[in-house]
Amino acid sequence: MRVITPLAIAPEKRDRVLINLHGGGFDSDSGSLSETIPIANLSGIKVIAVLYRLAPEHPFPASLDDAVAVYKELLKTYKPQRIGIYGTSAGAILTSEVTVKLKQLQLPLPGVSGIFSGLGDLGHAGDSIALFALNGFSGHLDDPDPNDRGSKEYTGTTPLNDPVLSPVYADLTGFPPTLFITSGRDLLLSGTTILHRAYLHAGVDAQLVVFEALPHAFWNNPALPESKEAEHLMAAFLDKYLGN
């Protein structure tokens, strides 16, 4: 794992920690630094980036088990309401999966979570994946089958309606306040909004922000002014609920 510590941590924030689950399609690390350094800086909270095992060598639930192990270790030092979990893309999916697993294990849930361009149903990615590619418009329409995009390497032999693998089928009641962020040309726009609605149906304090005309996980591009706006929203939300 990587430990990203702000240059200065205020005394009232020393008992808080964030867990980042990076993006990268479950087969690479494309965010353990770009998703953590801005959030640590803006929130003033230490961030632990989990370098979980990757597919195809390590399909589900390897990454889940690694993330849960880090959370359980942090529970020895931090109160659960002072722990937050967030991720982008694959890490956003994993964030929801981890929360379901923690509830199944009857462990105390984190104080806040962030699902930034993810989905909660590995069997039905939704309409947007037929329209968009990683960088926006794909230029052609595809069959919206997530398995055509390599997710089978992650899911392995697990049924796609497994409630941990696909949290839309799980009991989401009692989940922590959660911020969802996506964008109008995000291939996971549908998946993010469907999972957000599932959280709302379960009575979760779930907020959704949709940016206009931007591609998947655009906040990983530091040159965009919207990236700074998105990172401020993420950091403020995570900080707010860890401080309650």
Image (tube, helix red, strand yellow):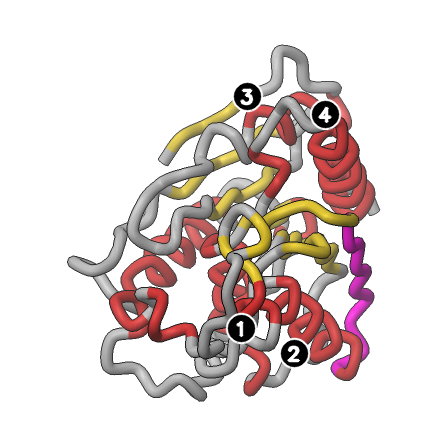
Q: Quadrant of residue 210?
A: bottom right
The residue where tag 2 is placed is 172
The mark nearer the N terminus, 1 or 3, is 3
Asked if one can make out residue 61 in the rendered structure from this viewpoint, the answer is no
The quadrant the N terminus occupies is: top left
Q: Secondary structure at mark 2?
A: loop
Image x and y of residue 204, in percent: 78, 72
Q: Secondary structure at mark 1?
A: helix
Q: Residue at x 79, y 76 (%)?
A: 200
Q: Nearer the viewer, mark 4 or mark 3?
A: 4
Q: Nearer the viewer, residue 56 or 77?
A: 56
Image x and y of residue 146, in percent: 42, 73
Q: Which residues are magenta?
A: 202-211
Q: Secondary structure at mark 4?
A: helix
Judge from the rendering whether residue 157 lies leftward or rightward of residue 19; answer left or right: left
The residue where tag 3 is placed is 5
The residue where tag 1 is placed is 100
The residue where tag 4 is placed is 42
User: What amino acid is at disc 1?
Assistant: Val
